[in-house]
Amino acid sequence: MMRVVSNDSEALLDAYSQAVISAADKVSPSVVNVEVRYGHRSTDPRLPSRGHGSGSGFIFTSDGFIFTNSHVVHGAETIEVALSHGVRLTAELMGDDPETDLAVLKVHAPGLLPSSGLGDSRALRVGQMVVAIGNPYGFQCTVTAGVVSALGRSLRATSGRLIDNVIQTDAALNPGNSGGPLVTSQGDVIGVNTAMILPAQGLCFAIPVSTATFVAERLMRDGKIRRGFLGVGGQTVPLPTRVGRFYALPRTSGVLIIAVEPHSPAQRAGLREGDVIVAYDAQPVDGVDVLHQVLTEQCIGVPALLTILRGIEQRYVRIVPEESQSVSQETRN
């Protein structure tokens, strides 16, 4: 029996398609393919090369700064990007940050560099439609669509590092899409695609653009990020209303500790899974991004007072941040 599709259903499908098409048309020109080649540091020509790899990226400023993933370019000897219209350019690595799996490249091609508009990832809602765009393996832009499945996730990459506050989406990705943009239906970039869990179905992740812009500023200025390290994995969570009112907390959210690294400052300070960080040295901490931002290089080795909630009890914990040691994915287990 032939199934009849109503006019309303056709209109709804057409509206969805038009939203995806519009977002892709707006952002695709800024999406690039990233090709990297690795080589041994040894001068011995008999040693074999480590080979090459590829991923995606996108131009986020008109003067040629490009977002991609740290795992795509970390340790690369040469980096080349292919623009959407086929022009290939040598790229300079401005810096990469394995702890957030982000990297910034720079290319020079005046007049040939369309950039993407950056949106506000903090305004995302679960269920919101998103579009993932990549340029994998030298093919033209690949576009997939889905919804935001969850916010505030923590993802442990294959290198062993824990990446906090990621966006989970069911917009299909493949490894070659790493570094490409995750965009809204209006074509605003709200994330940098970073990984997928291969054995699972529909589990794909992106770093929020709020985190990416903070990291990019430091990489463009210094080439690296020195940051304090507490040794916790966390996610942003709402605070119980009654508890917040009782303690007159200035914010309605905090950072739930979901993992404590062994031999870390957090473990030595007595922090536990389930604790919620609400302030760092009297500065309110209402999310993972804020905690990242307060843990600057000025915090390293300087004692600080964490305000936490343990159950319904507010406590103060003294902690001394260490310098974060980024370990390359080739050597970390």
Image: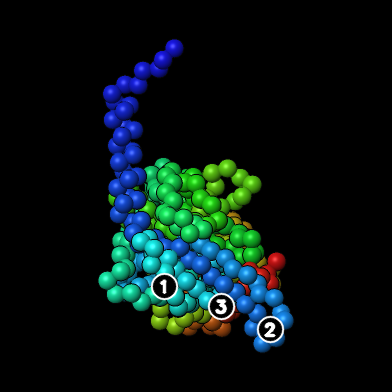
Residue drawn at 69 percent across, 83 percent down? 45
User: Which kind of residue does numbered mark 2 sit on?
Assistant: Pro
46 shown above or below 275: below
Residue 76: x %, y % from top left: 56, 75
Quadrant assignment, res 329: bottom right
CA–CA distance between discs 2 and 1? 27 Å
Residue at 29% across, 47% down: 22
Does 324 sit left or right of 6 as displayed? right
Q: Is residue 285 visible?
A: no
In the picture, the disc for residue 77 is: 3
Say which residue label 1 marks.
Answer: 89
Colouring scheme applied when the structure was drawn: rainbow
Q: Nearer the viewer, mark 1 or mark 3?
A: 1
Provide residue 78's location: percent of width, then percent of height.
52, 76
Element at badge 3?
Answer: loop
- The mark total stands at 3
Mark 1 or mark 3, which has the lower sequence index?
A: 3
Q: Residue at x 30, y 54 (%)?
A: 26
Element carrying mark 1: strand
Q: Residue 208: which quarter of the image? A: bottom left
- Asked if labels 3 and 1 touch by Cβ distance under 8 angstroms, the answer is no
Q: Is residue 50 above or below residue 234?
A: below
Q: Quick one: label 1, few (<14), some, or many (20+) residues within 10 Å? A: some
As displayed, is residue 58 above or below residue 123? below
Q: Are marks 2 and 3 in contact (CB under 8 Å)?
A: no
Q: Mark 2 or mark 3: name the one nearer the start of the chain.
A: 2
Question: Seen in the image, is 96 located left or right of residue 245?
Answer: right
Report the quarter where the C terminus lies: bottom right
Q: Say which residue label 2 marks.
A: 45
